[in-house]
Image (spheres, rainbow, N blue to C red):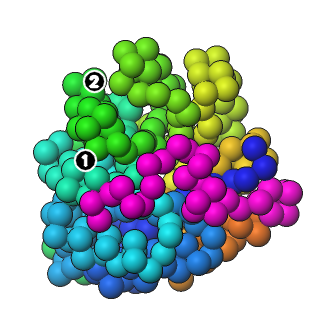
Amino acid sequence: MREIIITCALTGSIHTPSMSPHLPVTADEITAAGLGAAEAGAAILHLHARDPETGKPSAEPGHFMGFLPRLKQASDAVLNISTGGSAVMTLDQRLAAPKLAEPEMASLNMGTMNFALYPMAERISDWKHDWEKPFLEGSDDLVFKNTPRDIARILTELGQERGARFEFECYDLSHLYMLRHFADRGLIKPPFFIQFVFGVLGGMGPDPENLTHMVRIADKLFGEEYMFSVLAAGRHQMPLITMSAAMGGHVRVGLEDSLTIARGTLAQSNAEQVSKIRDIVEALGRSVATADQARAILGLKGADKTAI
């Protein structure tokens, strides 16, 4: 595929405000980050919310509605709402905002896993908020729950009942087989948009061999009925997503995945990362997909059919 879809994940639920002054927290900051990323070339905005007072990851629909309508009004980007939220949230909490917004697209984690963030706490000595250090350190005993029952519920309530399509986040090889299982059950239809996730402690490591193997198995399981994208955590972001682009895949950037633009240098914005990967992929001879091209490629229902 010549066109490449750039997804930008603006804030996430992993990094904390003490790690970077550029991490968007408030509705104004998330809106500005999204509009900047879209202008730079991101066709899809992957969205989490935060409490504007503390920067803590939030599942409150009101926090999402502080920026969702503004992003829709000022941009044609595809708004992709996380159903992962944060690993400390219940499934009901994680689904509250997506069910209200009825988005074109939502993310879906394809398996239960360890989600270990605690090594990050060792790098920070000056904390802005009391919740940050315990949040990170407590992840040494954290299980991110995504059971088959949870997955079926999300596919039913957001997919079948509300018409959303999914960014299937696969952190390990087993997640591809779980995706095949739900395709065989008839709960999802192609084309499948699979996001390979590398570098989260508890998931697969950021090794090039893992990417080539994931593509090989996905080819076996899904044939021509899927497309893949890659995200990688921290300093592995640009090398692995460049590899994805060279292999014909799509890419994801954003401060959710990496706070830097180069080793040891904080990114000033999400748009800076989008611009950097855009230059790389265009140098590889690929054209950056517009939001409407991404909608056609992914078979999305259209922004006019959402409740945002």
Q: What range of the chain is rendered magenta? A: 281-308
Q: Secondary structure at mark 2?
A: helix
Residue 89, percent across and down? 17, 49
Q: Quadrant of the N terminus?
A: top right
Residue where numbered disc 1 is placed:
87
Q: Is residue 162 above or below residue 307?
A: above
Residue where numbered disc 2 is placed:
148
**Given the image, on which type of amino acid does mark 1 rest?**
Ala
Picture quadrant of residue 50: bottom left
- Identify the residue shown where x is 42% and y is 60%: 303
Residue 78, percent across and down? 47, 61
Q: Is residue 25 left or right of residue 222?
A: left
Is residue 105 visible from the viewing direction of this image? yes
* Residue closest to the eye, 187 or 147: 187
Q: Is residue 107 magenta?
A: no
**Given the image, on which type of amino acid does mark 2 rest?**
Pro
* Residue closest to the eye, 299 or 133: 299
